[in-house]
Image (spheres, rainbow, N blue to C red):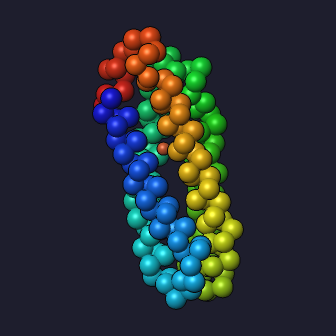
């Protein structure tokens, strides 16, 4: 269950960073581009390896048939791609160093990232909970070990 624990732990870290990102959308932080850029790179440093681990985990689960009827792997992976799309837009605007552009993108794609990411993690955790609840039939836990 080590992978699962790591994934859940990373969700907590990502939530914390998304809260930081949200603060930029709520407060008048127009002069804080550097801080914003740091927050984005913090998110990226957790998100990139998280996503890779998670997709491998999904593949392991689906290959072993565990939770196949619960885990909507295709939808979750499609959501990963959608989140990346918003992320690219936000990063491109950051590179322009144009404050207006950056803050407009933060207000659109940035907010979409925050909202969709939170919902996405909730969906994943609900699926994991349903799959790995002790009341479910016994499963081969070796499948989730690296
Ligand atoms: Fe995910
Ligand atoms: Fe995740």
Determine the residue positioned at 49% across, 63% down.
19
Horizontal side of 37 relative to 92 (left or right) equals left
Q: Position of residue 60 (x, y in %)?
A: 44, 26
Horizontal side of 32 relative to 99 (left or right) equals left
Front residue of 94/124: it is 124
Number of marks in picture = 0
Q: Position of residue 42 (x, y in %)?
A: 40, 65
Image height check: is 71 above or below 105?
Answer: above
Can the viewer see residue 72 in this picture? Answer: yes
Q: Which quadrant: the N terminus? A: top left
Q: Position of residue 97 (x, y in %)?
A: 56, 85
Determine the residue positioned at 58% across, 32% down.
73
Determine the residue positioned at 54% across, 83% down.
29
Can the viewer see residue 63 in this picture? Answer: no
Residue found farthest to the bottom: 31
Q: Quadrant of residue 140?
A: top left
Image height check: is 57 above or below 85?
Answer: above
Image height check: is 34 above or below 51?
Answer: below
Determine the residue positioned at 45% across, 82% down.
34
Image height check: is 62 above or below 46?
Answer: above
Front residue of 108/59: it is 108
Q: Which quadrant: the C terminus? A: top left
Q: Position of residue 129 (x, y in %)?
A: 47, 29
């Amino acid at each position: 269950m080590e992978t699962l624990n790591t994934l859940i732990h990373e969700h907590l870290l990502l939530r914390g960073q998304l809260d930081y990102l949200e603060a930029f959308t709520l407060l008048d932080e127009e002069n804080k581009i550097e801080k914003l850029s740091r927050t984005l790179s913090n998110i990226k440093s957790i998100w990139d390896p998280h996503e890779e681990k998670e997709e491998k985990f999904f593949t392991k689960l689906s290959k072993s048939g565990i939770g196949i009827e619960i885990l909507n792997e295709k939808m979750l992976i499609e959501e990963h791609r959608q989140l990346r799309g918003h992320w690219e837009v936000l990063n491109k605007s950051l590179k322009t160093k144009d404050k207006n552009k950056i803050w407009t993108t933060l207000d659109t794609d940035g907010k979409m990232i925050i909202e969709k990411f939170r919902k996405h993690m909730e969906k994943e955790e609900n699926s994991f909970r349903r799959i790995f609840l002790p009341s479910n039939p016994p499963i081969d836990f070796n499948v989730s070990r690296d």
